[in-house]
Amino acid sequence: MMPCRGLLDPGCASPCLAAMVQGLLERMFNAEKIDNWFENIGEVQYTRKILFSSLVSIMLQVVCRVKSNVYSAYVDSDIDATRQAVYDKLKNTETKTSQEIVRYIAKESEDIIREIKGTQPA
């Protein structure tokens, strides 16, 4: 599952802009890259059934108000684990992991901004 799936309104007034933003979000929140990153940064937590990218996807949907709560995002996900397992995984996410995922996403964003020359004056 792509962590950013469903974040943009399909009825967006500018389909080209929506497609571009969707592409940028998919690059920033690439599930495979996030899971590889987690394998290198996680100290106590591990991956068994629930990929870290799945947790990112759930929380992204809640934060961006695509879903009203974790449960509704979980129900619509393809996570093959119990609801309680998802809640436990979220509850036990290491503070360092939470801090580092913000840094990781910020770095991914910065790389994209530089690549499209978004720092250059118009």
Image (cartoon, rainbow, N blue to C red):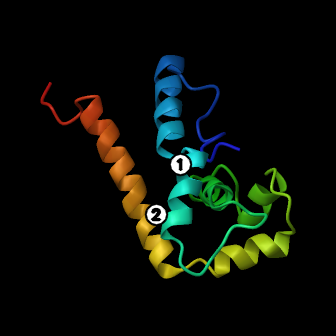
The x and y percentages for residue 34 are 54, 54
Left or right relative to 114: residue 108: right
Which residue has dot 1 on it?
33
The x and y percentages for residue 82 are 87, 69
Left or right relative to 105: residue 26: right
Name the image quarter holding residue 42: bottom right
Circle 1 packing at 10 Å, graded few (<14), some (14-19), many (20+), is: few
Q: What residue type is labelled 1?
A: Lys
Secondary structure state at the residue bearing disc 2? helix
The x and y percentages for residue 7 are 60, 42
Furthest toward the left, the residue is 121
Which residue has dot 2 on it?
101
Name the image quarter holding residue 87: bottom right
The x and y percentages for residue 59 are 62, 61
Secondary structure state at the residue bearing disc 1? helix
- Which of 58 and 28 lies nearest the eye of the viewer? 28
Identified at 50% across, 20% down, the residue is 14
| Dot 1 or dot 2, earlier in sequence | 1
Identified at 55% across, 55% down, the residue is 36
Q: How far apart are marks 1 and 2 (CA)?
A: 12 Å
- Which of 116 and 34 lies nearest the eye of the viewer? 34
Left or right relative to 43: residue 100: left
